[in-house]
Image (spheres, rainbow, N blue to C red):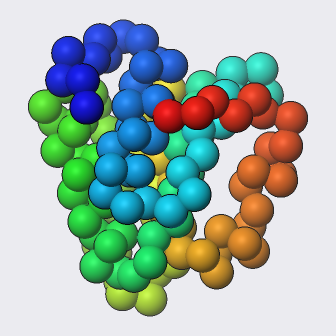
Amino acid sequence: MDDTLPVNDETALARALGVLLQEHKGGDVAVLDMRELNGWTDFFVIATVSSHTHLMGLLRHVKDFCREREVEILRGRRKIAPEDEWTLIDLGTVVVHLMTEKSRSFYELERLWNTAPVIRP
């Protein structure tokens, strides 16, 4: 992964987070360009997790990535219970969704936001 990512480039940030999740075995990673669809974020980065341990590992990687690049995490849950099936990390312009297969198929974010262009990480 490119460690020289400019943090002021939201598209590059979203893509880099997508690559990070893929590198750490996040399933079916999708980056959705939300800029034309809402006023509260620019990108969704969505990944499927296989277990609570996997979710916690991906969460740690995202937090480390943000800390190293001085990207502020606006909101992220402090406590994640083993039965939680979806957590998000709000970076303002990018919102990362880590979901179990069950929650991802139930909420269908890509279908809900089906007019959002998909960007390949």
Could one spot residue 83 in this view of the protein? yes
- Whether residue 67 sits left or right of residue 71 in the image: it is left
Query: Which residue lies at the image location 50% right of the left edge and 19% below the top edge?
Result: 11
Q: Name, please, the residue furthest toward the left.
A: 68
Which is nearer the eye, 79 or 58?
58
Residue 24 location, quadrant: bottom left
Could one spot residue 95 in this view of the protein? no
Is 73 above or below relative to 99?
A: above
- Residue 78: x and y in percent read 27, 64
Query: Which residue lies at the image location 75% right of the left edge and 51% below the top edge?
Result: 110
- Residue 36: x and y in percent read 77, 20
Which is nearer the eye, 76 or 16?
16
Q: Name, please, the residue furthest toward the bottom.
A: 83
Is 20 above or below relative to 121?
A: below
Query: Which residue lies at the image location 63% right of the left edge and 30% below the top edge?
Result: 119
Query: Which residue lies at the image location 35% right of the left edge and 81% below the top edge?
Result: 52
